[in-house]
Image (tube, rainbow, N blue to C red):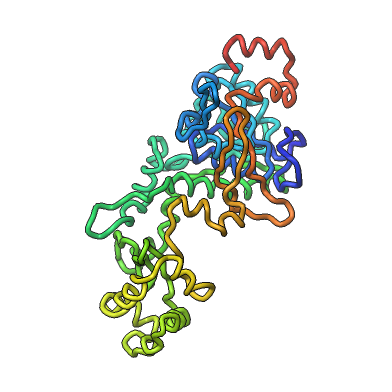
Amino acid sequence: MTGWALDAGDGPRPLAGVVVLDITRVVAGPYCSMILADLGATVIKVENPREPDYAREFPPKLTADGGEEFSAFFAQFNRNKFAITLDLQTDDGKEILRELAAKADVLVENFRAGTMDKLGLGPTALHEINPRLVYTAISGYGQTGPYRRRPAYDNSAQATGGLWSMNGFADRPPARVGTIIGDLAATMYGVIGTLAALRHAERSGEGQLVDISQQDSVLSLTENAVVSYTVDGKVAAPLGNQHPFVKPYELFPCKDGYVFFGGYTDKFWAITCGMFGADDVATDPAIDTMAKRFDPETYEAKVRPILLDWFSTRTQAELEGLAGDQVPLSAVKDIAGVVGDEQIRARDMVVGVDYPDFGHLEMFGTPIKLGATPAEPRGLAPGVSQHTDVLLRGMLGIDDERLAGLHERGVV
């Protein structure tokens, strides 16, 4: 650790003292550095003074009395950070980034491969200045390979990583996963890789490149698709709400919506039959074992109709009440139901913060629960260049004269 950090909040936090330079925008990069910030790292968000992170313009927005707006989307992914502006196209801007990198532990960027190298700020150049720097690069296709320079979005990763071809229903065109899973998967692997590399750097003094590809990340989410193809030659295709082989394990309609039911083991199946007063079904020789119920024809002819009949006359609440702690059955909730869910609230997964002038914002919390050094998701996102002067003075010792010149030349 550098021994230098801005105050990022009260309480013991596991990454306190770790300094992260965040040269990212939109989601995959900002979310990665946000998780590090929630865990206590001093995260310095570096934006272009004339073209800051364009997620600042994404809806929904909080609105002040005077009409000024602040993106809640941006706020959620950039909380707990400090913000400076720096034009990396200028010699002065590059020099300041080098000075910052010399004192940082981690740098996270999400440009196309080679972009930072062209600026003279890639991992090789920065490791000459700071050999222990962890340099995390998140991109569409990674830093190597024939696709490395292709532009990419989340959908690019879903398309080329196989997930898009598997999602949806058999009688319709494939459907993208309904969230930016390529960005989010790359985020998680970016955090894991960064922490692993940071651990190594702290032990050995040796930094390294952490190379995260959205395409790679999506491929790793395809469960059994790769081995099913390489072993049996089966190409995964859309299955709707069903699992490739586990049954019953899908969506079922009920009186006021839908539920997920996954009572496929012999134990869960017997309990479920007892819940509905149908012990004779549990002992039916045609469907009395998991292997028999897994058979597609048997499942469609005998098992699924029974479940449809049991569930159709009951509400979500009635079915969850019957299942209790005995079998895996869950109401399929929309986001309004999730935000109000008692388990979500008990786990502090919706947290609120107050933005001066803009009002109250509720956003998702952190799923990382640490007993001794908890993360803190209740943090504000910074305004553009909010901390430029204080950070350059405090971290780099830049005097007023040099700082004024940087402002005049549009470097910061």
Q: Residue at x 48, y 47 (%)?
A: 184
Give the side of residue 98 with respect to residue 400, left or right: left
Residue 129 placement (x, y as % from top left): 66, 30
Q: Quadrant of the C terminus?
A: top right
Residue 191 placement (x, y as % from top left): 58, 47
Q: Residue at x 71, y 42 (%)?
A: 205
Question: Is residue 117 at least partly visible in the picture?
Answer: no
In the foreground, 122 or 96: 96
Question: Is residue 146 at least partly visible in the picture?
Answer: yes
Residue 137 placement (x, y as % from top left): 53, 39
Q: Within the image, what quadrant is residue 272 found in?
A: bottom left
In the foreground, 89 or 355: 355
Q: Residue at x 40, y 58 (%)?
A: 222
Residue 110 placement (x, y as % from top left): 50, 36
Rendered position, 125 above or below 15: above
Q: Residue at x 37, y 67 (%)?
A: 250
Rendered position, 338 above or below 143: below
